[in-house]
Image: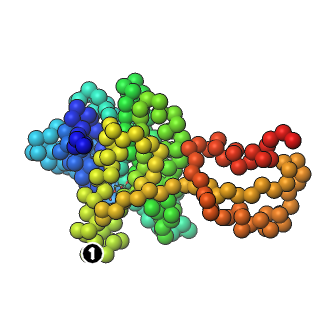
Amino acid sequence: MADIRFDGRVAVVTGAGAGIGRIYALELAKRGAKIVVNDLGVARDGSGSSRSAAEVVVEEIKKMGGKAVANYDSVSTMEGGKNIIKAGLDAFGRIDILINNAGILRDKTFHKMTEDDWDMVISVHLKGAFCVTQPAIAYMREAGYGRIIFTSSTSGLYGNFGQVNYAAAKMGLVGMMNALKLEVAKYDIMINTIAPNAWSRMTQDIFPPEFEQRMAPQFNSPLVLYLCAEECKHTGMIFVSGAGWFGRTALVSGNGVCTGNASREIAVEEVRDNFDKIISIEGATMHNSGAEIFQYMTPLLSPK
Ligand code: NAI
């Protein structure tokens, strides 16, 4: 089979001045894509700003013979999101790929978390994905093509101590994908969510030192590049990766139990007595939209 190439494609990578985003930008450029390297150049907690993060990566791409343009806007404002997409349209005339990757951390246990800790993390990860994806989708709908990545985290998918704000934002992105995929599938716009794991400044004091090489950011990019390829028609999926392991995570529904007859009241004790069936995920099913959940209630909803 032919190699996967991105010649003629334009990719926007947010937070591409460091860590995992930098690798996406370099690897896409190596395979022919023109890149918008967005990065606000902030510290891990979102403070400060610097142009050098994006500039350095643009230079790296140019040195390899690739084409790239830097953008220094924050993802977390509507104006910033519009400017990021405009940078690609102005420089290269199109946008085919958007990787929402920019991120910060404000870790604290819930009872110590300030409103600012909450707002900052939600604004970069969750609102940021809205601010950049909306103008990208406006273009992609017209063009009839797009590949979009949201960046989640196992902290949101499964939980992590001291990251309530981050986990909420990261799981929020899954909800955003689940709804948005339905709106844009007919335009050949595919949206998937990745929960990467890598040694970066975000995690270097969390992972043990011997993970530095084994958890290099490079090990996440092959999956993300595949999801950004024209040939990839998968959408609405969640993936977890790290150290060269790639797997899928999914929200599933158990078969549950029908009680009552949809007219008589149901006692709390009936729930207690059926609790084993209610919490069972044996034979669980995935769903493509919330409407599918009604199938479980069909026996109760059908006219008698
Ligand atoms: P990193 O800290 O190395 O890079 C993040 C980049 O985003 C930085 O260059 C930063 O300046 C930029 N950025 C932050 N706020 C921005 C804003 N408002 N606008 C534009 N750029 C902004 O982090 P890393 O590890 O590369 O993480 C990348 C993504 O992967 C993040 O979304 C992170 O939450 C996610 N992730 C990373 C994991 C890991 O193991 N490293 C685990 C799970 C998720």
Give the colour scheme of this rendering. Answer: rainbow
Residue at the spot x=26%, y=26% of the render?
Answer: 93
The image shows residue 44 at horizontal and vertical percentages of 33, 60
Q: Which quarter of the rendering shows the N terminus? A: top left
Relative to residue 79, is residue 88 drawn left or right?
left
What amino acid type is highlighted by mark number 1? Pro
Dividing the image into four quarters, tell me where ligand 1 lies. Answer: bottom left
Determine the image quadrant of residue 195.
bottom left
- Residue at image point 49% right, 59% down: 157
Instruction: Tell me if I can see residue 147 in this picture.
Output: yes
Secondary element at tag 1: loop
What residue sits right under mark 1 in the picture? 209
In the orientation shown, which residue stands out farthest toward the top? 142
Most foreground residue, 302 or 174: 302
Which of 47/68 is in front? 68
Residue 230, image x and y in percent?
A: 32, 37
Of all residues, the one furthest to the front in this rendering is 1
> Would you place residue 131 above or below residue 122 in this image?
above
Q: Residue at x 47, y 45 (%)?
A: 236
Mark 1 neighbour density, 10 Å: few (under 14) some (14–19) many (20 or more): few
Q: Position of residue 105 (x, y in %)?
A: 40, 60
Dividing the picture into quadrants, the one containing residue 204 is bottom left
Drawn side of residue 49 relative to residue 150, left or right: left
